[in-house]
Each structure stands twice: as C-alpha cells, then as structure tokens.
Amino acid sequence: MTLSGKLSLALILGSTALLPAAAMAQADWPTQPVRVIVPFGAGGAADTLARLISDELSRTFGQQFVVENLTGAGGVIALSQLTQARPDGYTLGVNNISTTVIAPAINPNVTYDPETDFTYIAMLGGSPTVWVANPSVGVDSVEGLVEYAQASSTIPGYGSPGAGTLSHLIALKYFDDIGLPMEHIAYGGAGAAFLDVVAGHIPLASGTLSTASPFIDAGQVVPVVLSTEERDPALPDVPTFAELGHPELTSTTWFGFVGPADLPEDIVEKLNTEINRILDLPTVQERLEPEGLVGDRMTADEFAQYQADQYALWGPIAAAAEIEQ
C-alpha cells in the first residue's frame, strides 16, 4: 500500500472511531450537573414546577438539576440567555405563554425568535383563567354579566393581572368579539385584582384559577366562566368559553421545559419521557393541586406544535392591543 493510501485509511479509521465516542457521550448524558433557568422568582408557579421536576430528574439521572431563578424583563432576560447556551443538554429552562408567545409579539426588546431559537421538550402544565364577580353585582353567568354591562350608565371596568397577560387577552378578545365595551384595569398580579373585586372597587376580574381559588372557596367572589376544555369538577356549575361558542379561548397560563435550538433528539426524548412520568406521580400531583396547577402530558412534537399554535393565535391579538412596554 502506498503512503497516501495508508494515510487515507488511518484518517478513515480515526474518523469512524470518533463517531461511537460522540454517540456514547450523548447516550451517557448527563455526566455533570444540569442548569435549569427559571425566568421568575422563587415561590411562584414556574419555580414550583421547575423544582418539583428538577428534584425528580436528579433522582432519575443521578446528576443534580440545579434551579437558577433569573428574573427581569418579564422573563425575557432568562430566555435570551438560554438561547446562547450550547445545545448539549446541560443548560435547560422553563418557558411560558408570556415569554415565548406574548412577549415576542409586543416587546421590541425581545431578541429571540420563538419559532427557531428553542427546542421544545415537554409541557409541564398550567392554570386556567377564570372570571370572578363581586356577589353584590348579582352576576353568576356571562349572559348576566353582559346584561349588567349593557344596563350600566358607565362603561364597567374589569381587572387583570397585568396588560398583555393571558387573562387580559382572553377578556379583551371576548369583549371585542361580542362588541361589548369594557374598561381594562391592569394590576400588578391577579391577587391584587381579586382583592379589589372583593372590596367592591371593580365588579369583575380575569385571572388564574390558582390565585382565585381561595376567594372562591371563601364565597368572597362568584366564578363566572373558565378557560378549560371541560368543566372543572370542583366548579361543576361554571361553564367554559367553549360552551359559550368560543373554543379558541380554551387555554391556560402554561409552563414548559425548553432548551436552546438543536438539542439532540435522544436527550429530548429522555427528558420528555421522564417528565411525563413525573407528572403522573401521586406525590407530584398532590403538590400541584393546592397550587391550582394541572399537569399536561405531551410529546415533544406535540408541545412544539402547541407552542406554534398558541403563538399564531395570541401573538396577533397581543400585537393588535398595542400594549405599552
């Protein structure tokens, strides 16, 4: 064999020897701690979900999944940092409808593209929107609410957790669709809006069921409608938007598990399978239930499609609302 032939053979053998090593390194993932970026502060729904999932993933894979709360700009800073990470499975994060659906449509400072800059791994779950009214208003249905608003001498106001939140956009779209003028009042969270309903300062508020539940249970507010697919067993008399002819308003303030773009498929599959198993654990469900959070199991492809569908629906609605940043 000539010298050039020997060199070519050596290069071929050397290259093929590297392939199993790379595949093995990927197959053995994780071999070191995994960073999990949470774009919101400790104690919130995103943090609760991330820590529950990360603790179980640590047990399964024998490496620590370390939660890091990186707040600022409504979660945009954390998600921007995640897109810059290497797609090796050692930097993951939590996204939600605000960070990868609404913010890219209304915030000019968002530098990432939700359609190309992330790998969507698994849906974690979320909390549906509920409308609640002050009992003194005498409203226990959307029909009653419409009659109340039409009979009012002034345009009634409704509260939400903040401009551009899902609870705001659901109410905005519904009232626009039926041609009912309502004044939006943005609060710094659903709890503040619900407290003003209880105090009688506003007749109605739209916010997450997880936050509204204590007020509903105490009889301080009356639930009017839910954004769930089906009626909530705990609130069997409360209809859904779908029942009212608006199935497009079926949604939750949801959270998911994501990575940077081009995350290897086998790592995505490992994580998706394990996260879905974790969401079925009774101990995890017991932790989520008091928070008003409902785990939602999807394949990675289903979650990616869900994200795309949500962006196609709520992105234009948010953009048209001309929400100031």
Image (spheres, rainbow, N blue to C red):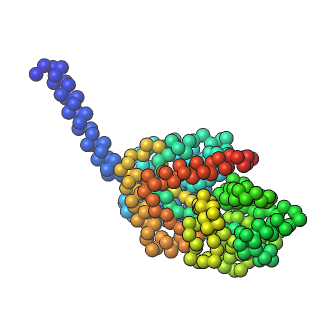
Residue 211 horizontal/vertical position (percent): 65, 69
Find residue 239 and report its image quarter. Answer: bottom right
Q: Report which quarter residue 69 is drawn in.
A: bottom right
Q: Is residue 5 left or right of residue 217?
A: left
Q: Quadrant of residue 192?
A: bottom right
Which part of the image, by quadrant, shows the N terminus? top left
User: Height in image: 91 above or below 46?
Assistant: above
Q: Nearer the viewer, residue 34 or 162?
A: 162
Tell me if residue 172 can be seen: no
Q: Position of residue 173 (x, y in %)?
A: 69, 56
What residue is rendered at 81% in x and 66% in y? 149
| Residue 225 screen position, x and y as percent | 66, 69
**At 71% from the left edge and 69% from the top edge, which residue is drawn?**
142
Q: Describe residue 307's horizontal placement relative to residue 200 as left or right.
A: left
Q: Residue 247 or 211: which is nearer the viewer?
A: 247
- Report the number of numbered marks: 0
Q: Of 91 and 203, which appears nearest the observer?
A: 203
